[in-house]
Image (cartoon, grey):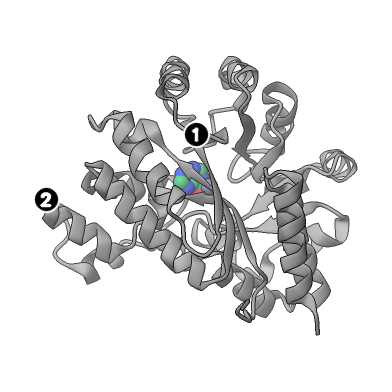
Amino acid sequence: MTQAFDTPPAVELHCHVEGTLEPELILELAERNRVSLPYADLDDLRARYAFTDLQHFLDLYYANMAVLRTAEDFAAMTTAYLRRAAAGGLRHVELFVDPQAHLVRGVPLEAVLEGVGGALAAAPDGITSGLIPNFLRDRPVDEASEVLDALLASGADLLGIGLDSAEVGHPPGDFADVYARARAAGLRLVAHAGEEGPASYVTDALDVLGVERVDHGIRCLDDHALVRRLVDEAVPLTVCPLSNVRLRTVDTLADHPLPGMLDAGLAVSVHSDDPAYFGGYVDDNHRAVREALGLDHAQVRRLADNAVDAAFVDDRRRAELRAEVAAWAQP
Ligand code: HPA
Ligand SMILES: [Zn+2]
């Protein structure tokens, strides 16, 4: 029987698996792996989650990854994510992972891919999934290129590639060759653009990288011609409202431009980014925007349909997900 949720069936297209590492699990893994962390206790760790901007968050996000050492650790993190997300109505997830953040710490790529991939393959409740390694745009392009080779050689089941980390000063165009090679290898292409960076990075992600979906993209609103283009070309934007507030790219949820983006006809959908850090999973994001912005049922339905349309799934799975959203939307 399908469970009734106050939020639509969740299609998560913008979630970093390392951003699902909850504070309790950080301390548990630290103890298991004898990693010493600079936090007195859970409260001390939690007190550090008040961020001034993206870089401030990234500093803590990368520091906390020190506790992830083995495939079992990556599996434990991913399984905990799936359990929590399933309780919030998760039906399909295309999960981001940051291989370079682990390789630079001496953790082998295989441990990352086996741990995360193995847990995804064992996802509960008919949840479907794909894995999208992201390259760190604030590290050298040559490194990304080598990691792409290693990913392709690993034989892991990969859905696509993405681009994340500190955005300003790291335009998408630097990664043109990496993206061209990934595309030739049959991978789907996404990139973070227009989170803190300018609207021109969104244009570059489309024109230079050839991405099929833009992660965040909210700064497109600074460029009317770009908005028109995104509408005309139905380019999906994976928007993360709680993240935008916590990283101060938007003042408050009530100020979030999501309703205007919907009104403009942009193909926006709502996702969680780093749920353990930003105050909620995809269902929490849906609940928060509905309450803070007073979205009506039709607007929430549109967000849910947009997520299904933007998913990298085959026709059969898309039809199933569409039907689940339609069933949820029945009065
Ligand atoms: O919100 C984000 N932006 C860029 N890079 C990231 N890596 C994890 N989360 C983020
Ligand atoms: Zn992100």
Instruction: Mark 2 vs mark 1: give the one in front.
Output: 1
Local secondary structure at mark 2: loop
Q: Is mark 1 within 8 Å of ligand 2?
A: no
- In the visual, does 283 lie left or right of 51? right
Q: Can you give x and y, in whole percent of width and height, for residue 290 in the image?
A: 68, 76
Q: Name the residue located 41 percent from the left edge and 19 percent from the top edge.
A: 143
Q: Can you give x and y, in whole percent of width and height, for residue 191 in the image?
A: 61, 36
Tell me the residue that label 1 is attached to.
157
Q: Name the residue located 87 percent from the left edge and 56 percent from the top edge.
A: 264
Classify the position of the N terminus by image quarter.
bottom right
Q: Name the residue located 76 percent from the left edge and 61 percent from the top edge.
A: 322
Tell me the residue that label 2 is attached to.
36
Local secondary structure at mark 1: loop
Q: Is residue 314 above or below residue 104?
A: below
Identify which residue, 108 or 14, lies in the foreground: 108
Q: Can you give x and y, in whole percent of width and height, for residue 223 in the image?
A: 80, 42
- In the visual, does 98 lie left or right of 219? left
Q: What distance separates the C-alpha of mark 2 from that of mark 1?
A: 33 Å
Label 1: how many Cα within 10 Å (few below 14, some 14–19, many 20+): few
The disc placed on residue 320 is none
Q: Is residue 219 visible?
A: yes
> In which image quadrant can residue 174 be found?
top right
